[in-house]
Image: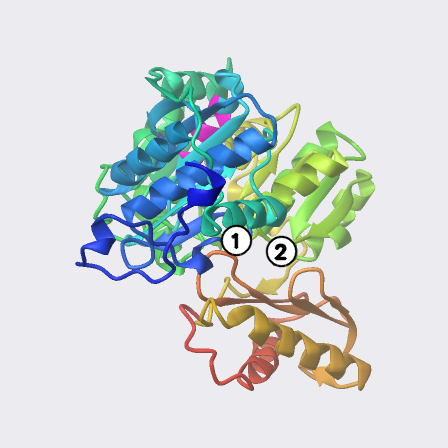
Amino acid sequence: MTPSSKIVPLTKVTQNSWSFLRDAMITPTGFREYDARWKYPEEINLPGITALGLGLGTQIRRRGLKPEIAVGNDYRDYSLTIKNALMLGLMQAGISVKDIGPALSPMAYFSQFHLDVPAVAMVTASHNPNGWTGVKMGFQRPLTHGPDEMGELRDIVLNGEGQVHTGGAYEFVDGVREAYLDDLVGDFKMTRKLKVVCATGNGTASAFAPELFERLGVEVVPSHNTLDYNFPHYNPNPEALEMLHDMADSVKASGADLALGFDGDGDRCGVVDNEGQEIFADKVGVIMARDLSRIYPNATFVADVKSTGLYASDPELKANGAKADYWKTGHSHMKRRVHELGALAGFEKSGHYFLAEPIGRGYDCGMRVAVEICKLLDRNPDQTMADLNRALPRTWATPTMSPWCADTEKYDVLERIVTRLVAMHEEGKTVAGRAISEVVTVNGARVILDNGAWGLVRASSNTPNLVVVCESPESESEMREIFADIDKVIRTEPSVGAYDQTI
């Protein structure tokens, strides 16, 4: 292929047509802030995936990187087909592909270190339901593509700038799963008895988590640990109340010490304590930060804007010299921020945790979080997870709630909502009867009230939704009032639809 004969992908996907089986078709909205993600085959076809691989390979070469990449896929019935089409495009670009087989996203990130390759591409729809596909990718380990890299890749692919190159090769690399598990376990073994509900929602983590816990010396209570890409019980997403409620029921039925649940590609972890209380991941992060800041005084912790205000206000973290930094939601944004600041860890309300050296390598890994929670409980043998949770200053927070909003409209809609919320602050208006002390606009709008309560609205980076979270240090009723007032502003936009879950 030469620049004069470049082939520009079609942007409208029409199934059951001659062109659909021959020509690359890609809906442009699939190039998101830090992942590529589409409904398949409604928004992308297999030649489109191959064009994506050619574009990614071209991007690797433009960056002057060694032309090698590790590639994995999650456990969905169509992910192998997607991966094969992607690898074809990468090889067309002259890239040597190291196929690590079915994998968790963090196993793919691990393979960059283990195989010493500069690039990674993980075929996964993450926690999205079946019918979605996508790719998480990165060049500078442990980082993944952010907006700049995704914008560059989008332009290469959609402008038909992919360059065919000689030297493409394929190799299936066995043994990465075993090396990944060995790396997670190390020489650690529990000294206290621990009984854990292992919830994997029949997703990819089913092939990893039960064995991991057994090797740690943990008694496993199975919960949907049979691989089944139909997800017969629920879509594995530990931020969804459906999965958390199921985990809580399993804890109560089994008398387990806690439940740990993982999403479809294993980079997120959800927690339910021994009393069946569902602990949102940002609060779990505070529990972990308290423990880690005793071991590593004066550490910096990054929290996303959806997370509790306790990272900045918790007396114990302050006493240990911990510093809090609130940053943009999104695994790529958070990885990069942790890396730039030299932070010890980063925490996202969605259940992504970024544990840096000397604990982890800085990428998000639900399995690593599970190991570190087991170690935390081992260091505190006289305390339960419920004890550690109760020790935190009390706040009342909503789950993450996502009202529908089209990908083509959500950023414009959000901009107008943010403008209205900023105007409310400037005009001295109140939320839940309280004065607005600040509106942080680093990622949507986090409206902070005079008592530290807050409400957030932002755009989802991966799905056609807005995202809403609210928290009060005073009461559940105030939390509900904050949500009601924020929602009133959101409802000024007629294109915003129903919530996926609400309080």
Label 1 vs label 2, nearer the camera = 2
Percent across and percent down for residue 184 are 48, 22
Does the image show residue 347?
no
**Label 1: how many residues lie within 10 Å, few (<14), some (14-19) or many (20+)?**
many
Answer few, some or many: residues within 10 Å of disc 2's Cα (few below 14, many 20 plus, some between 14 and 19).
Answer: many
Residue closest to the eye, 247 or 133: 133
SS at circle 2: loop
| Tally of numbered discs | 2
- Residue 396 sits in which quadrant? bottom right
User: Which residue position holds label 2?
Assistant: 307
User: Does the rendering let one see residue 358?
Assistant: yes
Q: Residue furthest top?
A: 187
Asked whether 235 or 333 is in front, the reply is: 333
Residue in view at x 33 percent, y 32 percent = 88
Give the magenta part as a residue range.
103-111
- Return the x and y of residue 30 as percentages of the image width and height: 43, 55
**Left or right: where does residue 20 sit relative to residue 445?**
left
How far apart are the alpha carbons under marks 1 and 2?
A: 9 Å
Which amino acid, mark 1?
Answer: Phe
Q: Main SS of the magenta segment?
A: helix
Which residue is situated farthest in the front direction here? 4
- x%, y% of residue 153? 52, 45
Pointer 1 with pointer 2, Cβ within 8 A: no
Decide which of tag 1 and tag 2 comes sooner along the chain. 1
Please determine whether, in this image, residue 194 is positioned above or below residue 469: above
Picture residue at 36% right of the left edge, 23% below the top: 100
Across and down, in percent, residue 83 comes to: 32, 36
As shown in the figure, which amino acid type bears the numbered disc 2?
Ser
Q: Which mark is residue 89?
A: none
Whether 492 is among the magenta residues is: no
Relative to 223, does residue 502 appear above or below in the rendering? below
**Residue at numbered disc 1:** 280
